[in-house]
Amino acid sequence: MSDSEREKLAQRLALVRERIEEACRRAGRDPASVTLVAVTKSVSIERAADVAELGVSDLAENRPQELWRKRSALPAARWHVIGHLQRNKIPQTLPVHLVHSVDSLRLITALEAEGARRKMCVPVLLQVNVSGESTKQGLALHQLFQVCDQAQAFTAVRITGLMTMAPFEAEPERCRPFFRGLRELAETWSNRLEQPHDLAILSMGMSQDYTVAIEEGATMVRIGSALFAENSA
């Protein structure tokens, strides 16, 4: 990346951080309570390295194959899985900092088996389809109950929170009910889980709607185009 491109990335990152701080201020929250996760999907290893050098420790990929490739080049980063994870790709994907996209009991069972086999902790978020859209992955409410009900049997998997994807809206304010719904779910369901599991992390909000998500309680925001797209502002 040229010096001018790196400078543009630094400017976009500064703007995202400023907007995170402003959203936290409006919500009466500490900006340190929000983790910025840079989504490096469709960007080069060099650009991922640049954002890491600018101080973003948490990087995420949708596709496991891309995560494997970039992780080998940037092993010091905290890598997150945010896309659908097929069970046959679990062995090569683990270990990671966090799997955001646990969307079925079959997947969490497979993660538990591999984590137990390798005697490692596997931190996960339960992806919930709050909007009910058929095109989105995620657990329905009755499935969330099933997973939480079986959580105490897990020895490797650690449930650490919830994740959702709001519908794409031209007006981010329309996403607010979905973010609020996930926060209310976490508040309601947290008493179903016993340590070491909890629902402290809320991964919600992307480039188009992350400030609204923060106002509704997001503790992780997944930012891609606002950092890497040339026309972002």
Image: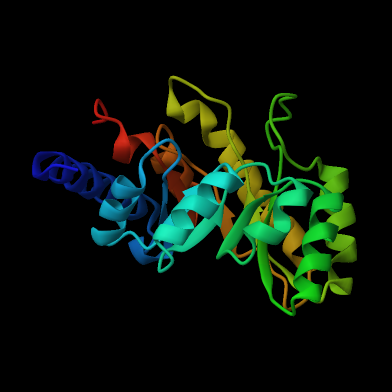
Point out the residue furthest to the top here: 170
Point out the residue furthest to the left here: 4
Picture quarter with the C terminus: top left
| Residue depicted at x 77% and y 50% | 88
Instruction: Look at the image and tell me whether residue 217 can be seen.
Output: no
Query: Which quadrant holds residue 90?
Result: bottom right
Residue 125: x and y in percent read 66, 57
Q: Nearer the viewer, residue 94 or 56?
A: 94
| Residue depicted at x 74% and y 45% | 86
Q: Nearer the viewer, residue 26 or 61?
A: 61
In the rendered image of this protein, does residue 219 appear above or below residue 63? below
Instruction: Look at the image and tell me whether residue 233 can be seen.
Output: yes
Does residue 76 appear left or right of residue 11 in this picture?
right
Total labels: the figure holds 0
Residue 213: x and y in percent read 48, 43
| Residue depicted at x 60% and y 47% | 64
Does residue 216 appear left or right of residue 200 in this picture?
left
Does residue 232 appear left or right of residue 98 in this picture?
left
Residue 24: x and y in percent read 36, 54
Residue 10: x and y in percent read 18, 48
